[in-house]
Image (cartoon, helix red, strand yellow):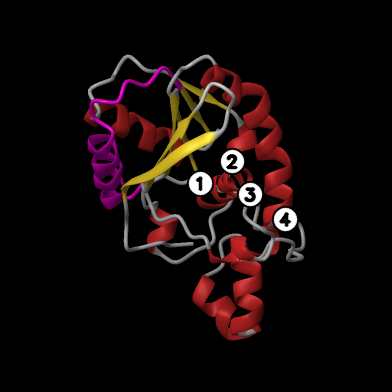
Amino acid sequence: MAYLILSRHGTSEWNKLGKWTGLTDVDLAPEGVDEARRAGEAIKGLEIHKVFTSALKRAHQTFEQIKKAAGQEHLVGNKHPALNERDYGQFTGKNKWQVKEEVGELEFQNIRRGWDAVVLGGENLKDVHARVVPYYEEHIRPHLLEGQNVLVVAHGNSLRALVKHLENISDKRIADLEIGFAEVYCYEIDKEGKILGKEIRHTNVYKGI
């Protein structure tokens, strides 16, 4: 048996401002650093063998705090853009609440959480799923099958795409899934790659964007 540990990054400077961040490479806010430390404390005592992060610094900064708090400072993260946040295209840098006023509640939720919303110059969750899942299957799952515990530190949408795959969530129901900043999902995986159990080890009431 192995553990797959998923953590979203902590609150970033743009998250505080209510901006859609996407691929913009911003730093963690001070509260995001604190959130990441608490995520690390939540998995203290669970030995981690491999770590995968997105290529964006807010994810790697979160990982640095997690490994310190978990007492596993020797760990090195494998960065890859396949785990990056969704590209918000035309909405990147815009305030989400202003966009909500402009487009209305229904369209806003479709843009924000929908499976195949059209976003000019950007990605929807379906696009993110198409890059995250092959990367997981090729680079992460083999370690789990070998009995190694794996930590993945990424973003709200890249993790939503992965959880959709892991839990076989429908295209419609995935709109209901939100992962808060620095939340920690811990899956027990058997030697055939099947999920035996799931535990949310750290939660955050602020889900962000």
Asked if the residues shown at circle 2 and circle 3 are in contact, with their CB atoms under 8 angstroms apart, the answer is no
Camera-nearest residue between 26 and 100:
100
Ranked by sequence position, the earlier of labels 1 and 2 is 2
Residues under labels 4 and 1: Cα distance? Answer: 16 Å
Residues under labels 3 and 1: Cα distance? Answer: 19 Å
Residue linked to disc 1: 155
Residue linked to disc 4: 122
Residue 145: mark: none
Tell me the element at label 1: loop
Rendering quarter of residue 188: top left
Rendering quarter of residue 140: top right
Residue linked to disc 3: 168
Query: Which residue type carries mark 2?
Result: Asn
Tell me the residue at 41%/61% (across/down): 207
Magenta residues? 28-50
Residue 84: mark: 2
Q: Is residue 150 visible?
A: no
Ranked by sequence position, the earlier of labels 4 and 1 is 4
Position of residue 187 measured from the top left corner of the image (x, y, whole percent): 44, 37
Q: Residues within 10 Å of mark 4 (few under 14, many from 20)?
A: some
Tell me the element at label 2: loop
Residues under labels 1 and 2: Cα distance? Answer: 7 Å
Asked if the residues shown at circle 3 and circle 4 are in contact, with their CB atoms under 8 angstroms apart, the answer is no
Is 34 one of the magenta-colored residues?
Answer: yes
Residues under labels 3 and 4: Cα distance? Answer: 25 Å
Query: Which residue type carries mark 3?
Result: Asn
**Above/below status of 98 relative to 126:** below
Query: Which residue type carries mark 1?
Result: His
